[in-house]
Image (cartoon, helix red, strand yellow):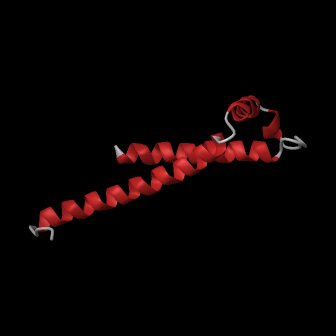
Amino acid sequence: MYRLLIVVGFIGIVLGACGLAVLIDVENKRYWYSHTRFAEMWMMLTEKNAMTTNICLNGGIMAIIISFLRLQAHGAAKAMVKSGKKSS
């Protein structure tokens, strides 16, 4: 489950980063990605909810951090059980 959350976190980071690039270029529209359907949809979405970029970027980062910590704890617990030690 946590491995899936890592994938979802990376997707959120990429989506938020692409959306941020679109928002940075909103006035000039110099770059090719500012003329895509994604840019139009992202602008429409951010007009309704200005926190969309923050939610994607920060949510993706938090999902990855939490997943790595939980996977690390799970791996440590499996190693402890394998060695026969009890947790204190």
Q: Position of residue 39 (x, y in %)?
A: 75, 34
Dividing the picture into quadrants, the one containing residue 73 is bottom left
Count of numbered badges drawn on the protein: 0
Residue ID at (82%, 39%): 32
Q: Is 68 on the left or on the right of 53, as rendered?
A: left
Q: Is 81 on the left or on the right of 43, as rendered?
A: left
Q: Position of residue 77 (x, y in %)?
A: 21, 61
Q: Quadrant of the N terminus?
A: top left
Residue ID at (40%, 57%): 68
Residue ID at (77%, 32%): 36
Q: Position of residue 9 (x, y in %)?
A: 50, 47
Residue ID at (56%, 43%): 12
Position of 80 relative to 22 (above/below): below
In the picture as drawn, the residue positioned furthest to the left comes out as 84
Dividing the picture into quadrants, the one containing residue 23 is top right
Position of 56 relative to 47 (above/below): below
Position of 46 relative to 7 (above/below): above
Q: Nearer the viewer, residue 55 or 80?
A: 55
Q: Position of residue 11 (x, y in %)?
A: 55, 43
Q: Is 17 on the left or on the right of 35, as rendered?
A: left
Q: Nearer the viewer, residue 54 or 37?
A: 54
Q: Nearer the viewer, residue 54 or 14?
A: 54
Q: Quadrant of the C terminus?
A: bottom left
